[in-house]
């Protein structure tokens, strides 16, 4: 597994975030990613950006994210476009 992370922007008690994880887990290994959770409540900018749209996933660029709802297939396609895999 690489050191590259798929970031899950979340916050405490986010039930939709738990549903999102069900779609995320199958995609991680295929893309050699680990999951990193970031609590938006700890960052004013992230709260402003994602406060109404979590769960959100990304690769580190807050301007390029995938917002819930998404399926594992949609997430996989989104990642492939960004990681350069066909």
Image: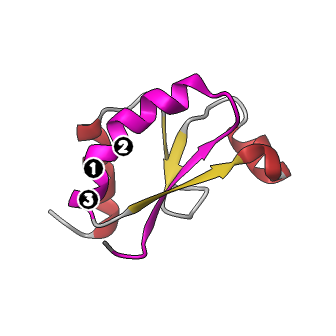
| Image quadrant where residue 10 sits | top right
Give the label on residue 27, or none.
1
Query: Which residue corresponds to the image point at 31% horizontal and 68% vertical from the top-left?
Result: 83
Asked if labels 2 and 1 touch by Cβ distance under 8 angstroms, the answer is yes
**Residues at discs 3 and 1 in contact (Cβ within 8 Å):** yes
Query: Which residue is disc 3 drawn over?
Result: 29
The percent position of residue 15, horizontal first and vertical second, equals 57, 23
| Relative vertical location of residue 44 with respect to residue 86 in this rendering, above or below | above
Q: Nearer the viewer, residue 79 or 22?
A: 22
Which residue is pictured at 60% across the width and 34% down the height?
A: 54
Magenta residue span:
2-31
> Counting other residues with Cα less than 10 Å from the Cα at mark 2, is it few (<14), some (14-19), or many (20 or more)?
many
Quadrant of the image for the C terminus?
A: bottom left
Kindly indicate whether the residue at mark 2 contacts the one at mark 3 (C-beta within 8 angstroms). Answer: no
Residue sitting farthest toward the left: 86
Which residue is tagged 2? 24
- The residue at the point 49 percent across, 30 percent down is 18
In this rendering, is residue 47 above or below 37?
Answer: above
> Residue sitting at 23 percent across and 39 percent down?
73
Secondary element at image label 3: helix
Element under disc 1 = helix
In the visual, does 81 lie left or right of 67? left
Q: Secondary structure at mark 2?
A: helix
The Cα–Cα distance between marks 3 and 1, rounded to whole angstroms, is 6 Å
């Amino acid at each position: 597994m690489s050191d590259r992370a798929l970031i899950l922007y979340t916050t405490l008690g986010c039930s939709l975030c738990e549903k999102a994880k069900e779609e995320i887990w199958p995609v991680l290994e295929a893309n050699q990613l680990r999951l990193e959770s970031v609590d938006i409540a700890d960052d004013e900018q992230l709260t402003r950006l994602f406060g109404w749209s979590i769960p959100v996933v990304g690769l580190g660029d807050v301007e390029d994210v995938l917002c819930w709802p998404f399926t594992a297939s949609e997430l996989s396609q989104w990642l492939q476009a960004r990681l350069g895999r066909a």
